[in-house]
Amino acid sequence: MRMENVQRLVARRVEKLLEQLALLVTRGRTGEAVPSVGVTLHLTHGHQVSGELLDFLPKEAVLLALKKEGLLRSESVTYVDLASVVAVTVTDAGKLAQVPGMVRPLPTRSDLQKLSEQLAKGITEQFWPSEGALGGQVLRFEVDWVGLDDEPGRLALELALNVASHALKELGRSEKHGRDAIRRIATVRFVKGKETSAELEGDTGTVTVGPGPTPTVQGFRKGFTVEQ
């Protein structure tokens, strides 16, 4: 499972997770081609048991086929009291994408347009609220959708929008630069590029969105900074 997809997983209580994984197992029993689910159950007192999930009884027990060297499963099974399970490790997180409700839906173009407006508005209200209220300067996030309006592009853009927002807020709160550093930026443009980075020219910040390492708040903040 790619890192950007792992980041889209949602948190679940241990019992709810096992219940949803068991539904995947049930689909397999009906003849549907679904992957087996390997898990490690972390138990109270520091013990753990690993195997393939076979069945789950809500509020009561978990049934695992134990692992065996060189084979998918052995002929042994373990019945685990649900009350003793404190955490679950899923062997291959990619399989969670096939479990309903475990992955946040991919953002649409409309979702990201709303997000960009909300983030820019939040920064405006934090660092120059009076100007915005009186119809004066407000920060704008603008997206050039060329090359970004597909699944990988929208995922990368969502990440870049959030990182840029955090970087600008940190820049505005810093003792060295403060509000003046934010107030000199009128627009931040997001465009497709070979790698993800940020830079500032005049009153316009540009974030290029591309493949490669995950962008960092520190890196974006440095890109938006004009050294005196």
Image (tube, rainbow, N blue to C red):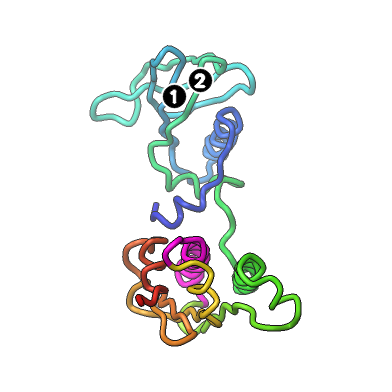
CA distance for labels 1 and 2: 6 Å
Query: Measured along the vertical axis of the image, is residue 81 above or below residue 161?
Result: above
User: Which is nearer the N-term, disc 1 or disc 2?
Assistant: 1
- 218 and 60: which one is in front? 218
Please give the residue where the numbered disc 1 appears in the rendered image: 41
Query: Alpha-carbon neighbours of circle 1 within 10 Å: few (<14), some, or many (≥20)?
Result: many
- 178 and 83: which one is in front? 178
Residue at the farthest left position: 70
Is 178 situated left or right of 101 in this image? left
Is 212 situated left or right of 32 in this image? left
SS at mark 1 in the image: strand
Residue at 46% over, 80% down: 205
| Image coordinates for residue 169, horizontal then vertical, percent | 52, 63
Q: Which secondary structure dominates the residues rendered in magenta? A: helix
Residue at 67% over, 68% down: 125
Does the stretch in magenta take in 168?
A: yes
Is 66 situated left or right of 96 in this image? left
SS at mark 2 in the image: strand
Q: Quadrant of the C terminus?
A: bottom left
| Image coordinates for residue 59, horizontal then vertical, percent | 64, 20
Amino acid tagged 1: Leu
Image quarter of residue 226: bottom left
Magenta stretch, residue numbers: 149-176
Residue at 29% over, 23% down: 68
Query: Measured along the vertical axis of the image, is residue 18 above or below residue 80?
Result: below
| Image coordinates for residue 185, horizontal then vertical, percent | 52, 79
Please give the residue where the numbered disc 2 appears in the rendered image: 85
Q: Are marks 1 and 2 in contact (CB under 8 Å)?
A: yes
Does the stretch in magenta take in 153?
A: yes
Residue at the farthest bottom position: 202
Residue at 50% over, 81% down: 189
